[in-house]
């Protein structure tokens, strides 16, 4: 199981499936971001074998400063990513 209903707090036993899900998501992100993603790491409690955790994968993506500046420049007044995804910064 991965994910929780809004407002729910639940710890579940560790499962090796979390690592498998991370590697699949990492590959998907790497394909989408290409060279813009310098590193993609599995962080948080689901990354620790044997540790009970909330079933939510936490990822950290490292990008170059130039990449952030590029996405800030191409952002429209609606604060939308060019591929239709909302950007996490600024007001919509």
Image (cartoon, helix red, strand yellow):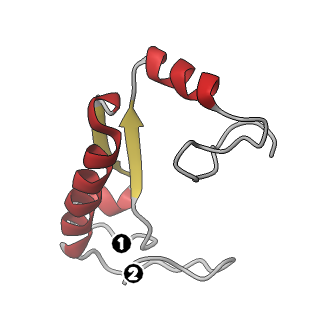
- Taking depth in this image into account, of 72 and 63 the one nearest to the observer is 72
The reply to whether discs 2 and 1 touch (Cβ–Cβ < 8 Å) is: yes
Question: Residue 46, relative to residue 10: is it above or below?
Answer: above
Question: Residue 92, relative to residue 22: is it above or below?
Answer: above
- Taking depth in this image into account, of 14 and 18 the one nearest to the observer is 18
Q: Give the CA separation, mark 2 to mark 1.
A: 5 Å
Mark 2, residue position: 12
Residue 62: percent from left, percent from top: 37, 30
Q: With 1 as the anchor, is 6 left or right in this view?
A: right
Q: Residue at x 56, y 42 (%)?
A: 82
Label 1 residue SS: loop
Question: Residue 24, relative to residue 41: is it above or below?
Answer: below
Quarter of the figure with the N terminus:
bottom left
Mark 1, residue position: 52
Label 2 residue SS: loop
Of labels 2 and 1, earlier in sequence is 2
């Amino acid at each position: 199981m991965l994910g929780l209903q809004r407002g729910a707090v639940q710890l579940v036993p560790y499962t090796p499936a979390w690592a498998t899900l991370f590697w699949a998501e990492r590959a998907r992100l790497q394909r989408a971001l290409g060279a813009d993603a310098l590193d993609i790491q599995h962080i948080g409690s689901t990354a620790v074998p044997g540790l009970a955790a909330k079933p939510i994968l936490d990822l950290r993506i490292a990008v170059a400063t130039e990449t952030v500046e590029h996405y800030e420049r191409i952002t429209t007044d609606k604060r939308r990513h060019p591929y239709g995804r909302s950007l996490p910064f600024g007001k919509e």
